[in-house]
Image (spheres, rainbow, N blue to C red):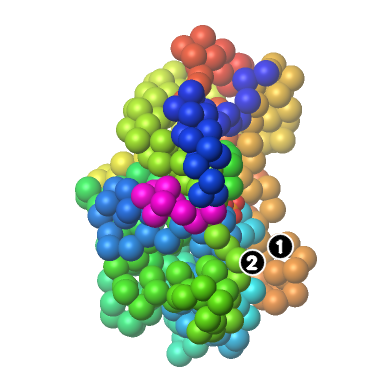
Amino acid sequence: MIPISKPDISNLEKAAVMQVMDSGMIVMGPITGRFEQAFADYCGVKHAIAVSSGTSALHLALLAHNIKPGDEVITTAFTFAATVNAILFVGARPVFADLDEQTFNIRPADVEALITPRTKAILPVHLYGHLCDMDELLDISSRYRIPLIEDACQAVSASYKGKLAGSFGTSTFSFYATKNLMCGEGGMITTNDDEVADSCRLLRSHGMRRRYYHEMLGFNFRMTDMEAAIGLTQLNRLPEFNAKRAFNAAYLSAKIESVNTPQGKEGHVHAWHQYTVRINHGRSRDNAVQQLNEAGIGTGIFYPVPLHQQSHIRKVVGNIKLPRTEQMAEEVFSLPIHTQLTTDDLETIVQEVNKL
Ligand SMILES: *Cc1c(COP(=O)(O)O)cnc(C)c1O
């Protein structure tokens, strides 16, 4: 079986973890600090705050922007549940914009049409590693004075006109095992806003600036130095990972003929977190996926049920229709694109997909 994803762990990561274990500084120590600095430098921002997951990054980013019960946050229903669960956990209401079929990301025109006096944040998700239409979203954000909080959990190193994910507003990243840069579990918030950064740092560790003096209510969303050591090593290897993923994507796109291959937009560099195709001619996506799995090709469906149709979210938003989101949820599936595919693997994927 060619798996849909596979963490790329070399002897460098293993050695870095062993060094931390021997050092005695295990949680949020010097290596977490170095990872934060290196990540901030990489994205070209003032602050990076390491946390325990992408979910906790989203949760803290919303709290740090003072998103409260009664507020509305415009986002997408075509994402992992964590995006919307974070909105629900701060007591706010998710408002769903429909998609651009080319990138699977929210359409700025739909976002603007949904703005009300209660809209307190726009939370775009850069799905599969392709940034949203950032010029348009930044323009809406500045005209209405509504902050952008990006879910860049799938988009580390994606860029638009040379500007990297994480550098547009307040951004959140995940380092879960399947992500392009992984620590096992882990997350990061990036921002140029000193107050947002300070709030995130306090909320991450029980509101403490000085140990056992609590300025506010907070969580334990700390990162361990073992995770940070893996992350720091993976950050150094990221250019190598990106090149491999881009090569794999180009290979698949050049040879796959039986389904619609992903088309990035002008000015964008895709991070290729997922290589997501669309079935066409009214054929069944689920049959296609089954046929590929039987032929030894791992696949993923991100995501089979859009979030407005999940029971705990439907209770909040009611029965709404998002025609393009619902259509994409029926047509997409993702093929392996990870860094450890061989040319033989790529050729096998092409041959099996072209049999569909
Ligand atoms: C992975 C992911 C998250 C959540 O990250 P965790 O580290 O698993 O908590 C949130 N949003 C998106 C789009 C993701 O892909």
Q: Nearer the viewer, mark 2 or mark 1?
A: 2
Q: Which amino acid, mark 1?
A: Gln
Q: Residues within 10 Å of mark 1 (few under 14, many from 20)?
A: some
Q: Is residue 65 left or right of residue 289?
A: left
The image quadrant that residue 318 belongs to is bottom right
Q: Is residue 140 above or below residue 78?
A: below
Would you say the magenta stretch is mainly helix, strand or loop?
helix
Q: Is residue 21 above or below residue 164?
A: above
Please name the residue shown 58% across and 21% down the image. 353
Residue 306 visible somewhere in the drawing: yes
Please name the residue shown 51% across and 19% down the image. 341
Q: Is residue 113 above or below residue 251?
A: below
Residue 84 visible somewhere in the drawing: no
The picture places residue 300, in percent across and down from the top left corner, at 63, 36
The picture places residue 7, in percent across and down from the top left corner, at 55, 31
Q: Which amino acid, mark 2?
A: Asn
User: Which mark is on residue 309?
Assistant: 1
Q: Earlier in the sequence, mark 2 or mark 1?
A: 2
**Residue lying furthest left in this view?**
162
Closest to the observer: 143 or 236?
236
Q: CB at mark 1 closer than 8 A to ligand 1?
A: no
Please name the residue shown 63% across and 48% down the image. 303
Query: What is the spatial separation of the Cα atoms under label 2 and label 1, in whole angstroms?
Result: 14 Å
**Magenta-colored span:** 27-35
Please name the residue shown 62% across and 20% down the image. 2
The picture places residue 104, in percent across and down from the top left corner, at 48, 51
Closest to the observer: 10 or 106?
10
User: Which mark is on residue 85?
Assistant: 2
User: In the rendered image, which quarter contains the N terminus?
Assistant: top right
SS of the residue under disc 1: helix
Q: Is residue 34 magenta?
A: yes
